[in-house]
Amino acid sequence: MMGDVTRRSSAAQGARADNRSAARLVGVRALALAAHRLDRCRSIDEVAHVATSTGVEVLDAGNVAFCRIDQDTCRTVVVEPPPVDPRAVWMARASYRADDRPALRALIRDRASWVAHARTVHDEPTVPDDPDAGDPVEVDMLRELDLASALAAPLLVNGSVWGQLYAVRGRPGLPFRVDDIARAEVLAALVAGAVARVDLEAQVRHLVADDPLTGLANRRIADAEAEAALESGHETCIVMCDVDGLKRVNDELGHDTGDDLLRSVADVLGRAAAALPGSTAARIGGDEFCLVTVGRRRAEVADVMASMIAAFPLPHGAAISYGIASTAVTGSVSARHLFRQADTAQYKAKRARARALRSMVPAAADPAVTAERVLVAGTAAIVAAQSGVVPRLCAFAAAATETLGGSAWAVLTRRSPAEPPSAVARGGSPAEIGVESSTAVVMHDLWQVEIGMSATAATGEVVATSLDALAAVAILGAR
């Protein structure tokens, strides 16, 4: 009898050994396959899905989660397979602070894996405060979800803990052991390498393809998208945009404010691109932007541009002039020709807008109404200007000139009342040939402000008084 028992025991041990060898072989093959699949990933989401699906197989786990750790906070990106239990779903969507999870804190601090067990090999509850069971917080969570065991391995990217792979086994199930930790750490190393590569590729794409100030595509991408759109055979539109008032904003309020203005323009173009799926918004350079659309009718593009510009006006009195060129009008042309046509249309729109601004004050306008408009615009400009006499006077001069339909303005000063004034700042643009205009001169102490006016603008003592008052506010308020 004893001999029979010994032989059966030996045979059982051999079978278990063969099973373990087979499991190890399956694990090695799965890891090799994971390495090939990870090498083809081009986004973090793709890496996450490969990592979790492979982890389920390699670790013989019920669920595997790919987690991101940032500023000592862990959040789940992907879980495979997706949990069904409402409690598990809620926990997968939650974020965890290292201050509340000692095991997570140790993983970040020591860059080491950990295991926790709520059940023994015989599927019996682990003894409370058993050091071999792992961190009590993790054990309590396993008990709450009626799970057997959990394991976490850090994802080390560029020497720092970027995230973790987290795996659990349900009941009945064996606790994770040393071999499981080893396999998890090998998989985590492969995944971390893929994360580092994908992140680097994304940074390179951003440097090559994106405008650093606005986040839109750059000229190279715009050209490529236009070529691809033309090759598709669908109607292609190019919208060329220019920022009216950027120079004035830079001169009066500073280049930081000018950069904010450019980002506001990018926001408008980005919204237009989102409303026209398949479109690309780009910054060509300076204050020039463009939108490339494919498969969209010119009328639809024009409607979207008009609605977005109306819904999201630019700050500081700036505006967007734009022109549209479409293959439905030009026929089969090169991308360069289409860009040139759109640029010409934009230039015409810009000139038309300038003429409209100069004639917005009719000849028969009530001087009192004009004075009120000057006071409102001038006060707003002075309040928004940077501190200092010159910026405040420039803001006032530009706002008054625009309100009165003028073209150019200037701020001058003199050292003493007997000396002639010298220009400190100028703005606006010269009047078009043949267009009648005039200049209002406002003097206060040693300062002189020249304000351009349309020949049709209402004048009179009330308008002059409003200009004098604004000049005084700009100068005295800066002291």
Image (cartoon, helix red, strand yellow):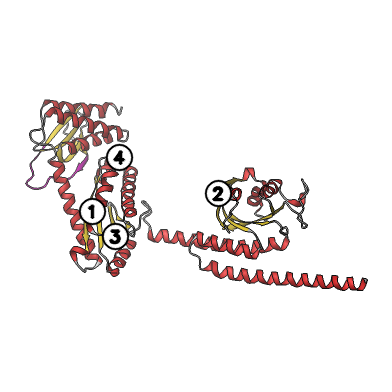
Q: As shown in the figure, which amino acid type bears the numbered disc 2? A: Arg
Q: Using the numbered discs, state the Cα–Cα distance from disc 1 to disc 4 in whole angstroms.
A: 32 Å
Binning the other alpha carbons within 10 Å of mark 1 as few (below 14), some (14 to 19) or many (20 upward) gives some
Mark 1 element type: helix
Which residue is at 10% across, 32% downward? 365
Q: Is residue 331 above or below residue 418?
A: below
The earlier-in-sequence mark between 4 and 3 is 4
> As drawn, is 160 to the left or to the right of 337?
right
Q: As shown in the figure, which amino acid type bears the numbered disc 1? A: Ala
> As drawn, is 466 to the left or to the right of 84?
left
Q: Using the numbered discs, state the Cα–Cα distance from disc 4 to disc 3 in whole angstroms.
A: 34 Å
* Residues rendered magenta in the picture: 425-438
Q: Which residue is mark 3?
A: 293
Q: As shown in the figure, which amino acid type bears the numbered disc 4? A: Leu
The earlier-in-sequence mark between 4 and 2 is 2
Q: Which residue is mark 4?
A: 253
Residue 413 in the image: x percent, y percent? Answer: 21, 33
Q: Which residue is mark 1?
A: 302
Residue 97 in the image: x percent, y percent? Answer: 60, 45
